[in-house]
Image (spheres, grey):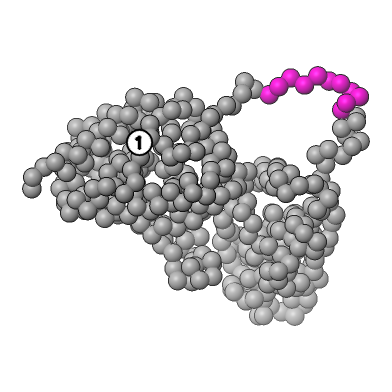
Amino acid sequence: MTTYSINGLYEGEQLTLDFGSGSPVIPHDRGSINAKYVKGEVRIVTEQARYPLPTIVGMYEDTKKYVLNPDFQRRHRWNRDKQSRLIESFIMNVPIPPVFLYEVEYSKYEVMDGLQRMTAIYDFYKDKFPLTGLEEWRELNGLRYSQLPDQVQKGIDRRYLSSIILLQETAKTAHEAQRLKQLVFERINSGGVQLEPQESRNAIYDGPLNRLCIELARNPYLCRMWDIPEPTATELETGVFADDLVSNETFRRMEDVELVLRFFAYRQRLLHDQTALNVYLDEFLRQGNGFSSELLTKYKDLFQQTVKLVFEVLGEDAFHLYRQRKSGWNWFDRPTKVVYEPLMYAFSQRLDRAEELVLKGQYVREALQEFYQSNYAIFEGRKVNRADMNARNDALIGLLDSILAAIV
């Protein structure tokens, strides 16, 4: 059974973090600047198109020509009210922002931005929801597309969804194409709904480690301990998320993916504790995408073994903190990261004694209440420096070792 320590990293895992000292000063050489502009460096090549709304159904279903869920798309956020308001905007002929497509190969496109709009239009034409929450056309609330008066149907059918297409000529290499796609995604989203930190990472630093984190975020044990709906048979078969999952805040914000990333990044966090956490996670993911497939396989195995062991020993409330308040001591009603990181670390250090820990699970659970009372000073507040992290790690490993050593 594989275990690890902060000073015993896997081969090829060590990071070198170099954030520089700020943006370099570039001399204002007007001749060079003009030459760069004329040459067309870092210039997006686009064309525009307009699609009658009824044709969106065919586009949505044509998965060979349109890729609707590239890696940099955020998870679905729109509820039925918001979808209905989009349809009301079409009825009123309110201008709708264009969708952005990227031509990945000749006549094949990724939907970079606008998937929510396309999904709403598709679902509406497929009669998947009745209009709800309309303000200007309240008399249409409760009606599906097939139930609308003829003139209203015809009016909607005459509307268009505009698009801006980034053509293949934008980039000369696959690496440059990915960089520019991510750049465009970040820029067009900067004025809309604020991206969560992990949503930004997913957009900007996609790669093998990022995809592994997304995959492992649906681990049933992790889901149970973080109050996230578990994968359904439909999701596993088709990749379609259930409504209760889409509405789950942890899932929608991609915080579940960040939890997996934090588990891996924590292995070296003590070596880089002076770096702001979000900056550190960004850089860890960026460099981690270059890890070998062998190392990522070890990562996957390590996470799966650890999260399973934690669940088998501590159950669904594993990451809840016993804390002190004015009313007295009580268990916090939801999981916390201040418990998650050192607890996962401690259990991963004792995977070689997993069977013993499961057998003594009752004693571990009973000991935690007194443990948190005795060690509350290192778990309360915002304590994120090296000494605090070491203290939490050592305390939890010490707790496990004392129970493993006890004759019961």
Direction from residue 345 to residue 182 in the image, left or right: right
List the single residue furthest toward the left: 408
Label 1, residues with CA under 10 Å away: few <14, some 14-19, many ≥20: few
Answer yes or no: is residue 327 visible: no
Q: How many marks?
A: 1
Direction from residue 340 to residue 154 in the image, left or right: right
Task: Residue type at mark 1: give it.
Answer: Ser
Residue 176: quadrant of the picture: top right
Nearest the viewer among 12 and 355 is: 12
Compared to 66, does 337 lie above or below?
above
x and y, in percent, of residue 59 in the image: 73, 69
Q: Which residue is mark 1?
A: 5
x and y, in percent, of residue 150 in the image: 75, 80
Q: Residue at x 69, y 54 (%)?
A: 113
Residue 132: quadrant of the picture: bottom right
Q: Is residue 44 magenta?
A: no
Mark 1 element type:
loop
Answer yes or no: is residue 15 visible: yes
x and y, in percent, of residue 401 in the image: 19, 39
Magenta-colored segment: predominant secondary structure: loop
Compared to 273, does 368 lie above or below?
below
Q: Which residues are magenta?
A: 23-33
